[in-house]
Image: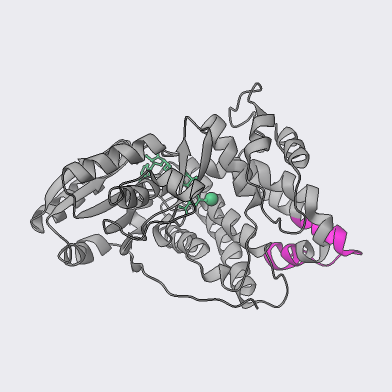
Amino acid sequence: MNNFTFSYPTKVYFGKDSAAEKLQGELSKYGNTVMLAYGGGSIKKNGVYSEMKEILTAAGKTIVEFSGIMPNPTYAKVQEGAELAKEKSVDFILAVGGGSVIDCCKIISAQAELQEDIWTMENENKRYPTEFIPMGAVVTASGTGSEMNSGAVITHEEKKIKGPLFGAYADFAILDPTYTISVPMKQVISGAFDTFSHAMETYFGKPDKNNLSDDINEAVMRSVIRNIRILLKEPQNYDARSELMWASAMAENGVLKIGKVTDFQAHMIEHQLGAYTDCNHGQGLAVIHPVLYRHIYKNNADRFARFARNVWGISDMETAEETALTGVEALADFIKEIGLPTTFTEMGISEDTDFKAIADTAVLTAGCCKKLTREEILYILNECR
Ligand code: NZQ
Ligand code: ZN
């Protein structure tokens, strides 16, 4: 195993009524002015907004509302939030939403404490913030695992880049599976597939032999498959929702990554696809993964064969390559079975999208078993159309 350091700054309150029981106590640790940040209004329809307002009011807080954080949050929205946080001298940020709201708030929390532009600071000068407005996350849609890490994915519209920025860790996260009941099933499944993708992109990293993180990872992947299937039959099933919610956090809280170098090539391609098309993250991944894996599985057939055996229950065939390919096809079949798109066209991505520009700007990773060239990325994108 590679050397590693592991510690965790985010306290997690998991389960029904967590906010009612724990939020006020947590809020008492911070100053008076709280930014209540949320998205396009789903929390007003499902009652979460009123619940948050009640708890904040009972805690005696002055509330500064920051709404309209869009899916695939933009850098302009981050700047708008940071300006507001400065102007109102916000002491604490409460992010209430899915990955987009939480990501946007992590960077607002850092930008509001900086005298310089965080995009330039991190991407050009390779310096990272150390001071933050403290924040907490109330998760209303699971999948990204954003609540338990400090990374954010932000779209810089002028630069046409959707890329990572690093900001605050949430001091605490409230994960109440009942808050996810109102999420449209299409988004639930796309979020769950995002979790599955995080697990795969970690599993196919290195080292790839005899590694506890991978044994745990296989259990996470099997759990996601099982619980997606349950939820599609029984959308109200609390148990399946809670399993998916915790799997989402587990895939991105660092536990599966202990001692590993991750891959994340599918994500890097999808993020640039997002920069050019504003597409749904989990859906983009669902289209890209099988095409990418068909392209590379022969470069580490043993690893893909283990994935086939231990995740999909496929028996060994004559050669490792045959087993490996059967596993990749099981993944592709599962994507169809759960109603995710299998082509960009199905996602509504226009034929005249500049796929060459996407291939030319996607970050190239070390690759799980083959470092791709830009030509290969363009080939993969074309196969996805
Ligand atoms: O904006 P509202 O009205 O709240 O509606 C949202 C949004 O339209 C809706 N929604 C959320 N909770 C709901 C609900 N609708 C009904 N009931 C609820 N309880 O769901 C829609 C999608 O929300 P969004 O936050 O965009 O989804 P998700 O959680 O999938 O986040 C996607 C973003 O996270 C980034 C993605 O790239 C994308 O920008 N990621 C962040 C990661 C991280 N920080 O670790 C890792 C991921 O790989 C990912 O890249
Ligand atoms: Zn993701």
Q: Is the residue 223 above or below the residue 117 in the image?
A: below
The residue that appears at 50% across and 46% down in the rendered structure is 124
Q: Is the residue 373 above or below the residue 16 in the image?
A: above
Q: Taking 1 as reference, is 244 left or right?
A: left
Residue 363 location (% of width, % of height): 63, 46
Q: Nearer the viewer, residue 123 or 218?
A: 123
Tell how many labels.
Answer: 0
Q: Is the residue 104 above or below the residue 9 in the image?
A: above
The residue that appears at 41% across and 62% down in the rendered structure is 148
Q: Quadrant of the C terminus?
A: top right
Residue 17, visible in the rendered structure: no
Q: Nearer the viewer, residue 31 or 383?
A: 31
Residue 6 location (% of width, % of height): 48, 75
Q: Quadrant of the N terminus?
A: bottom right
Quadrant for residue 87, please give it: top left
The residue that appears at 42% across and 38% down in the rendered structure is 71
Residue 346 location (% of width, % of height): 62, 30
The residue that appears at 67% across and 38% down in the rendered structure is 342
Residue 234, visible in the rendered structure: yes
Query: Residue furthest toward the right?
Result: 318
Main secondary structure found in the magenta portion: helix
Residue 328 location (% of width, % of height): 75, 53
Magenta stretch, residue numbers? 306-327
